[in-house]
Image (cartoon, grey):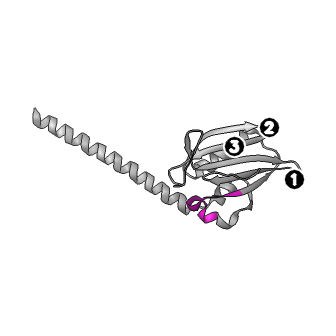
Amino acid sequence: MSKKVSRKIKFMIYIACTLWIVVFAQIIVTRIFVSQTDVTQAFARNQLVVEEGSSDMQNICREGGWIMGKIPGRLSTEEKRKIADDIFGYEGGTRLSEYTDRGYYVAYGYTNGIGLVKKVNGRTINMNIAVTYDENEDKTVVYFGVPFYNGEF
């Protein structure tokens, strides 16, 4: 009886160790993938034309910074939310919180693939999207910042 229990315990320890190895491998692969991808691809998928901040595009996820893109017309809150989710998802993360006020939309996200982190309202974040509408140009302006965008919009 004790041999059967011993084998079961060894098997459970083996399974637990294997699962932990898979988790660590996933975290490492996510960090490598995010550091080697270009944020412009996420913008292009959402038809956003990068206007400024493109000089540091390859390093934005490693060193922090921001980029700005524009899309023609005024977007609904649901469309703004979709862009945030798409860009956060492209970076391997998710949206943690969002705020909408007088046409402004701000979303905060987190991913294991970006090492720069900040605490906002008690939550750890490392991605931020701010969206506004420019009525002079009839374009929606989207700012993506790592770990967050702290400029005017």
Q: Is residue 46 visible?
A: no
Q: Range of the magenta residues?
A: 57-67
Cβ–Cβ under 8 Å for marks 1 and 2: no
Describe residue 140's horizontal placement relative to residue 62 as left or right. Answer: right
Q: Which element carries disc 3, helix, strand or loop? A: strand
Identify which residue is drawn at 45% across, 56% down. 29
Work out whether residue 98 can be spotted: yes
Determine the image quadrant of residue 146.
Answer: bottom right
Q: Amino acid at mark 2?
A: Arg
Magenta stretch encompasses residue 103 = no
Task: Out of 22 and 143, give the one closest to the viewer.
Answer: 143
> Pointer 3: what residue?
106
Mark nearer the viewer, 3 or 1? 3
Q: Position of residue 150 (x, y in %)?
A: 69, 51
The residue at 69%/64% (across/down) is 54
- Residue 43: x and y in percent read 68, 55
Q: Quadrant of the N terminus?
A: top left
Q: Nearer the viewer, mark 1 or mark 2?
A: 2
Give SS at disc 2: loop
Residue beneath the point at 11% across and 37% down? 3
**Badge 1 density bin: few <14, some 14–19, many ≥20, Cα 10 Å:** few
Question: Which residue in the structure is indicated by mark 1?
Answer: 137
